[in-house]
Image (cartoon, rainbow, N blue to C red):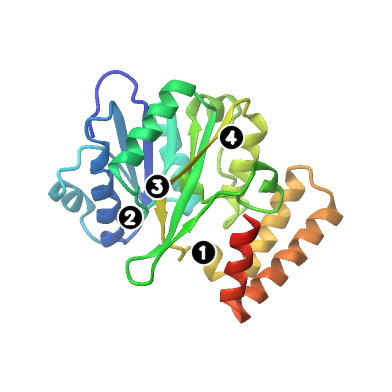
Amino acid sequence: MREGTESPLVSIITVTLNDESGICKTVRSLQAWSGEGAVEHIVVDGGSSYAIDAVLGALNWNGTLLKGKDRGLYDAMNKGLMKARGKYLWFLNSGDTIPSGDTVRVVCGQLKANTPDILYGDSWEGSEKDGWRYKRAKPLWAMRTGMITHHQAIIFRRGLILDGNIKYDLAFPIAADYDFVLRSLAASERTQYLPLPICGFEPDGVSQRYPLRGRRDQFAVRRKNGESYLVAAALFGGQTLAWLWRRMWPTGYWLLKRRLW
């Protein structure tokens, strides 16, 4: 990974707070970017209790470090977004990974050749302890029901975001990413799907810890983005039933989901 005077192709933005093992995992996975062109890595640290400068230095990391208190995950992501210089934005937070160097080469090639406003792909979901499950992205029309893929598997053209004044809305502490993607897709004229896993994601975020709050946030996001009350309420009810089914019979839930998507 290297930085130069010219604008990089991709700005990778990583938010972290008191997650030394996670930030190390993410930085190491980005070694695959070496030799793939001008790419910058921005780490936004919310005030970790350890010396993050020393940790990153020990990894021979040469990106941009932003340190200081913030108002949470999405405020930190906005800070990284405004600091970025790349043509494209890729949000990979602490603990997230890129599967392989081949993935990097394909992604860079697609961005250069097709210049999409948004590029999205599949993902690996799980952990080293529990194993990994391939999670294929849903079709675009399914955004009405929720995220079609992990946020980490979506790459945005920075000009699209800046021209549309699109930021993470702090009014949605759990579903601001959903709002961000909905608004970005509405502004996009060229959205490309890449049938390849482009991120590794461990599902232990706030939406998993606070599912009811997350569904309420999604309801509010849908209403903000023009969905009718009745449809938003119906989707809220359907998500609640799906969550109950997943808890009671996870095997059946995943079998049906694989058949649907």
Whichever of labels 3 and 4 marks the residue nearer the N terminus, that label is 3
Residue visible at 37% across and 53% down in the picture: 96
Residue marked by disc 3 = 92
Q: Give the answer, above or below, for where 184 lies relative to 199.
A: above
Q: Amino acid at mark 1?
A: Val
Q: Earlier in the sequence, mark 1 or mark 2?
A: 2
Q: Earlier in the sequence, mark 4 or mark 1?
A: 4
Identity of the amino acid at label 2? Gly
Q: Is residue 62 visible?
A: yes
Q: Is residue 116 above or below residue 179?
A: above
The picture places residue 246, in percent across and down from the top left corner, at 61, 73
Closest to the camera, between mark 1 and mark 2, is 1
Identify the element where label 1 is drawn. helix
Please identify, in this view, whether the residue under mark 3 or under mark 4 is nearer the observer.
3
For residue 36, which quarter of the picture?
A: top left
Quick one: SS at disc 4? loop
What numbered label is drawn on residue 47?
2
User: Dot 4 corresponds to which residue?
Assistant: 166
The CA span between labels 3 and 4 is 18 Å
Tell me the quarter of the image containing the N terminus.
top left
Q: Position of residue 5 (x, y in %)?
A: 26, 19
Q: Nearer the viewer, mark 3 or mark 2?
A: 3
Quarter of the rendering containing residue 212: bottom right
- How many angstroms separate mark 2 from mark 4 (CA)? 26 Å
Label 3 sits on a secondary structure element that is loop
Pointer 1 residue: 206
Residue 51 on image: x %, y %: 20, 55
